[in-house]
Image: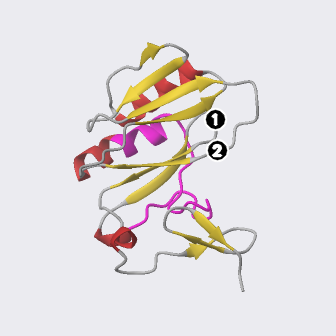
């Protein structure tokens, strides 16, 4: 049975501006409105649906697998917009690119604080070949999939 990821909903203070930011940063087609959503569609057909909220926004993590050329294009937009970026999800390696799994990766935030990641290789941890845990600020370890574990 083939199962594909279809969509997710991202809370936003300004869904239109947030969706436009994501589409422009990733070089995707302009967002489109559908009901309360501003939808950004990736090349594999998955939608990221921004929806306005006045409630608390709990930032989430979204990773995008890109080619080396796409990485260069997207990464070039980060300094153009004067955005901070990090090599790690804990945001401890400011202004650096990681080289995990023989590729490149970097993290930056959308206007709502959601952590966006671009990577050029699938993570080795996804197939269980190695432990990708990293130290998390404030104690604990962060494992692939962004699940924090307390230090023992």
Report the magenta residues as a range.
74-99
Q: What secondary structure is the stretch in magenta mostly built from?
A: loop
Q: Does residue 116 sit above or below 97 in this rendering?
A: above
Q: Quadrant of residue 100?
A: bottom left
Residue 58 percent coordinates (x, y): 69, 43
Say left or right for 31 vs 44.
right
Residue 48 percent coordinates (x, y): 45, 33
Q: Does residue 132 sit above or below 44 in this rendering?
A: below
Residue appearing at x 37%, y 77% in the figure:
128
Q: Does residue 107 sit above or below 24 in this rendering?
A: below
Q: Residues within 10 Å of mark 2 (few under 14, many from 20)?
A: some
Q: Residues within 10 Å of mark 1 (few under 14, many from 20)?
A: some
| View extreme (bottom): residue | 152
Does the stretch in magenta take in 77?
yes
Between 43 and 28, which is closer to the camera in this rendering? 43
Q: Quadrant of residue 134?
A: bottom right
Residue appearing at x 73%, y 74% in the figure:
139
Say left or right for 122 vs 92.
left
Secondary structure beneath label 2: loop
Report, in whole angstroms, how far the alpha carbon at label 2 lies from the one at label 1.
Answer: 7 Å
Residue of label 1: 112
- The first of marks 2 and 1 along the sequence is 2
**Quarter placement of the C terminus:** bottom right
Circles 2 and 1: CB atoms closer than 8 Å? yes
Instruction: Identify the mark at residue 59; answer none if there is no mark.
Output: 2
Residue 16 percent coordinates (x, y): 53, 18
Residue appearing at x 24%, y 52% in the figure:
1
Mark closer to the observer (2, 1): 2
Does the stretch in magenta take in 7?
no
Residue appearing at x 26%, y 35% in the figure:
43
């Amino acid at each position: 049975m083939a199962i594909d990821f279809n969509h997710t909903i991202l809370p936003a203070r300004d869904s239109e501006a947030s969706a436009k930011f994501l589409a422009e940063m990733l070089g995707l087609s302009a967002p489109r409105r559908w009901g309360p959503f501003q939808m950004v569609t990736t090349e594999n057909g998955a939608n990221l649906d921004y929806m306005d909220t006045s409630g608390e926004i709990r930032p989430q993590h979204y990773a995008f697998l890109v080619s080396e050329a796409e990485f260069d294009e997207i990464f070039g937009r980060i300094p153009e917009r004067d955005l901070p970026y990090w090599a790690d999800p804990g945001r401890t390696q400011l202004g650096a690119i990681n080289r995990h799994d023989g590729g490149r990766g970097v993290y930056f935030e959308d206007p709502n604080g959601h952590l966006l990641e671009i990577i050029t290789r699938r993570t080795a941890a996804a197939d269980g070949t190695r432990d990708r845990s990293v130290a998390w600020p404030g104690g604990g370890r962060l494992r692939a999939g962004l699940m924090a574990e307390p230090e023992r």
